[in-house]
C-alpha cells in the first residue's frame, strides 16, 4: 500500500512539474523574443514545401513545424509549444522507464533532474531537428525496453515507428541503433528476442516508413549526407583523431555536468554501487547501452576518422542519464534527499528560464550586433507585402535572396511564399530555376553585406528585375542602432513573359554555371 500511495503521489507531482515546464518554457520565448530563432525560420520555410528531404536534414521536423503553424496566430509561436511538448515527452519517457527500474520518488527525480541540462532548457525554444530527435530517441528506447521485457508485438511495432521517426529527424539515430543492436547480442535476455517476430516487425516497419526518404536521397545525390560530411570535415592531421573526440566529450560533459553535480544531493559525494538482482542487472545494462553506447560510438567514429563533431550532435543522448545514475548507484536513505534533488532541479530550471528571458530582453543592448531573435522579421514582411501590392494585385508566391532575410518573410508573411534560399536551387531543391522568372517574386539582400557589383550581377541574372531603393527598418529594442538596410528587387510575372526578355533570360539561364550562380549567393 505505501508503494501504491507513493506512486500515485509522484504521478501527480510529475504532471504538475511537466505542466509548469511547458507553460514557462513556452511563455518565455513568446514574451521575450521578437523574432523566430535561426533554425525555426528554416523549419518553417522548409516545411511549407512538404518535401521528403531538405539539403541539410531529413524532413520530419520541418513537417511538424508546418503542421503546428496552422494554429491560430503567426506560425512562430506554435513552434515554441511544439518544442516543449517534445521536451515534456522526453521527461515522461524517462519517468516511465524509471518506474520500471526504480522506486517512485527516484523515478521522478531521474526525469526532473534533466531540467538542469542545457539540452533540456535554454536550447529548447529553438525548434529544430535535435528537438524532435530527442523525443523520438526517448520513445524508441521505451518501446524497445517493453518489447524485450514483455515480449509483445505492439511495443516492437511502436519501436519501429519511433526508430523511423528518429531517423527521419536526424541521421545520428544510427548511433542509437548500433548501440542497441550491440546490446541485443551482448545481453543473453535481449539475444533471445531474435527468436521472436518482434525485431523483424520493428525492422520492417522502420524500413517501410523511411523508404520514401531513401528514394529522395538517391534522387538528390545524397544531398543531406554530403552536407553532414562537409560539416564534420577537418584537416587530415593526426592531432584531429585525438583533439576532436576529446573536444566533443568535453562539450557533452559541460552540457550534463550540472546534472551530475545535482545528483550528489540524492546520491551523496561518494557514490555507492547498488546491489541488484538478475532483473535489475538486465535493466541497468539496458539503460547503460542507451546512454553511453551512442556517446562511445560517436567518440570512436571521431577518433577513427578525425571528424569534428558539433557539440549539439550529442543533444539526443542523455534523456535517460538520471535513470542511469539511480540504476547504478544507491540513493541516500529516505525520501527527503530525493525530494530535495527534485526541488533544486526545478529551481535551477526556472533560473535558466530567467536567464534566457534576460538575455532576450537585454542581449542586443550589451553587444555590437543584434540578436537574431531581435530581427525585425514581421516588420520586413509587412514592408515587402506593401511593395509587392504596389506592383501587382497577384499574391506574393516567391521570395528569393539571402536565406535568413527571405526566410523571415516566408515565416511571417500572410501568404507564406516559397523561398529560393541564396538564389540557389540546390539549397531550395523544390524551386524550379525558371519559377522566379515565370511567376515573379521579390529578391532581398542585406544592403550592407554585399559588394558594389551585386546589383549588376542580379540584373544580369534577372534582366526584368526592378531594383528599388533599400528599405530601412529600425531595431525595436535598440532604436539608436543603425537601421537594418535591406536591398529589394521586384520581378513581376507579366514582365518576364515579354518575348525579348524571355529570350534574354533563356540565354542567361543556358550560360549559367555553378560558379556564376555562386556569385549571387551571400
Image (cartoon, rainbow, N blue to C red):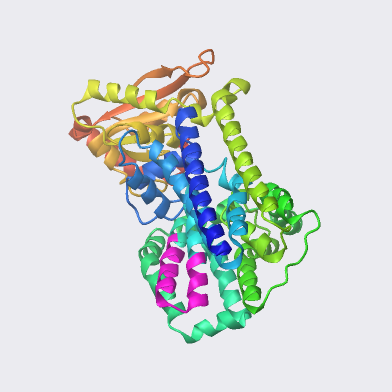
Tell me if residue 520 can be seen: no
Q: Name the quadrant containing residue 303.
A: bottom right
Q: Name the quadrant containing residue 361.
A: top right
Q: Nearer the viewer, residue 348 or 120?
A: 348
Residue 294 at what x, y percent from top left? 61, 63
Seen in the picture, residue 151 relative to 61 is either above or below; the reply is: below
The verdict on residue 258 being magenta is no
Residue 482 at what x, y percent from top left? 52, 15
What residue is rendered at 36% in x and 47% in y? 47
* Count of labels in the image: 0
Residue 337 at what x, y percent from top left? 70, 51
Q: Nearer the viewer, residue 49 or 255?
A: 255
In the displayed structure image, the side of residue 240 where residue 456 appears, left or right: left
Q: Name the quadrant containing residue 179.
A: bottom right
Q: Magenta region: which residues?
A: 142-165
Residue 168 at what x, y percent from top left? 43, 59
Q: What quarter of the picture does the N terminus occupy?
A: bottom right
What residue is rendered at 59% in x and 26% in y? 363
Seen in the picture, residue 136 relative to 127 is either above or below; the reply is: below
Seen in the picture, residue 468 relative to 38 is either above or below; the reply is: above
Tell me if residue 480 can be seen: yes
Amino acid at each position: 500500500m505505501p508503494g501504491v500511495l507513493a506512486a500515485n503521489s509522484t504521478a501527480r507531482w510529475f504532471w504538475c512539474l511537466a505542466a509548469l515546464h511547458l507553460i514557462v518554457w513556452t511563455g518565455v520565448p513568446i514574451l521575450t523574443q521578437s523574432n523566430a530563432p535561426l533554425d525555426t525560420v528554416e523549419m518553417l520555410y522548409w516545411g511549407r514545401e512538404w518535401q521528403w528531404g531538405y539539403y541539410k536534414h531529413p524532413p520530419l521536423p520541418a513537417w511538424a513545424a508546418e503542421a503546428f503553424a496552422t494554429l491560430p496566430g503567426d506560425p512562430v509561436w506554435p513552434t515554441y509549444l511544439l518544442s516543449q511538448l517534445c521536451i515534456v515527452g522526453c521527461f515522461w519517457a524517462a519517468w516511465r522507464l524509471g518506474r520500471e527500474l526504480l522506486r517512485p520518488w527516484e523515478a521522478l527525480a531521474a526525469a526532473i533532474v534533466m531540467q538542469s541540462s542545457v539540452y533540456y532548457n535554454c536550447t529548447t525554444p529553438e525548434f529544430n531537428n535535435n528537438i524532435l530527435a530527442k523525443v523520438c530517441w526517448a520513445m524508441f528506447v521505451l518501446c524497445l525496453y517493453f518489447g524485450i521485457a514483455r515480449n509483445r508485438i505492439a511495443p516492437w511495432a511502436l519501436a519501429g515507428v519511433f526508430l523511423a521517426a528518429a531517423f527521419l529527424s536526424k541521421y545520428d539515430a544510427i548511433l542509437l541503433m548500433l548501440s542497441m543492436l550491440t546490446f541485443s547480442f551482448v545481453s543473453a535476455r535481449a539475444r533471445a528476442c531474435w527468436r521472436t517476430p518482434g525485431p523483424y516487425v520493428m525492422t520492417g516497419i522502420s524500413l517501410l516508413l523511411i523508404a520514401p526518404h531513401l528514394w529522395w536521397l538517391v534522387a538528390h545525390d545524397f544531398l543531406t549526407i554530403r552536407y553532414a560530411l562537409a560539416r564534420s570535415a577537418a584537416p587530415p592531421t593526426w592531432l584531429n583523431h585525438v583533439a576532436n573526440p576529446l573536444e566533443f566529450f568535453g562539450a557533452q560533459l559541460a552540457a550534463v555536468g550540472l546534472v551530475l553535480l545535482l545528483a550528489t544531493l540524492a546520491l551523496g559525494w561518494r557514490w555507492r554501487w547498488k546491489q541488484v538482482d538478475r532483473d535489475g542487472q538486465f535493466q541497468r545494462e539496458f539503460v547503460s547501452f542507451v546512454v553511453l553506447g551512442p556517446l562511445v560510438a560517436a567518440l570512436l567514429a571521431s577518433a577513427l576518422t578525425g571528424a569534428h563533431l558539433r557539440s549539439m550532435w550529442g543533444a539526443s543522448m542523455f534523456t535517460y542519464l538520471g535513470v542511469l545514475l539511480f540504476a547504478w548507484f544507491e540513493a541516500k536513505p529516505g525520501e527527503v534527499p530525493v525530494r530535495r534533488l527534485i526541488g533544486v532541479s526545478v529551481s535551477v530550471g526556472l533560473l535558466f528560464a530567467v536567464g534566457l528571458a534576460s538575455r532576450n530582453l537585454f542581449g542586443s543592448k550589451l553587444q555590437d550586433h543584434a540578436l537574431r531573435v531581435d530581427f525585425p522579421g514581421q516588420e520586413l514582411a509587412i514592408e515587402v507585402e506593401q511593395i509587392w501590392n504596389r506592383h501587382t494585385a497577384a499574391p506574393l508566391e516567391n521570395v528569393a535572396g539571402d536565406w535568413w532575410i527571405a526566410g523571415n518573410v516566408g515565416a511571417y508573411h500572410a501568404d507564406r511564399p516559397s523561398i529560393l534560399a541564396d538564389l540557389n536551387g540546390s539549397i531550395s531543391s523544390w524551386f524550379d530555376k525558371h519559377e522566379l522568372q515565370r511567376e515573379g517574386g521579390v529578391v532581398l539582400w542585406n544592403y550592407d553585406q554585399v559588394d558594389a557589383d551585386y546589383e549588376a550581377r542580379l540584373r544580369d541574372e534577372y534582366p526584368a528585375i526592378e531594383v528599388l531603393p533599400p528599405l530601412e527598418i529600425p531595431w525595436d529594442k535598440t532604436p539608436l542602432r543603425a537601421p537594418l538596410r535591406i536591398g529589394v528587387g521586384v520581378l513581376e510575372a507579366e514582365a518576364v513573359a515579354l518575348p525579348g526578355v524571355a529570350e534574354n533570360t533563356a540565354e542567361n539561364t543556358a550560360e549559367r554555371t555553378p560558379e556564376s550562380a555562386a556569385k549571387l549567393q551571400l
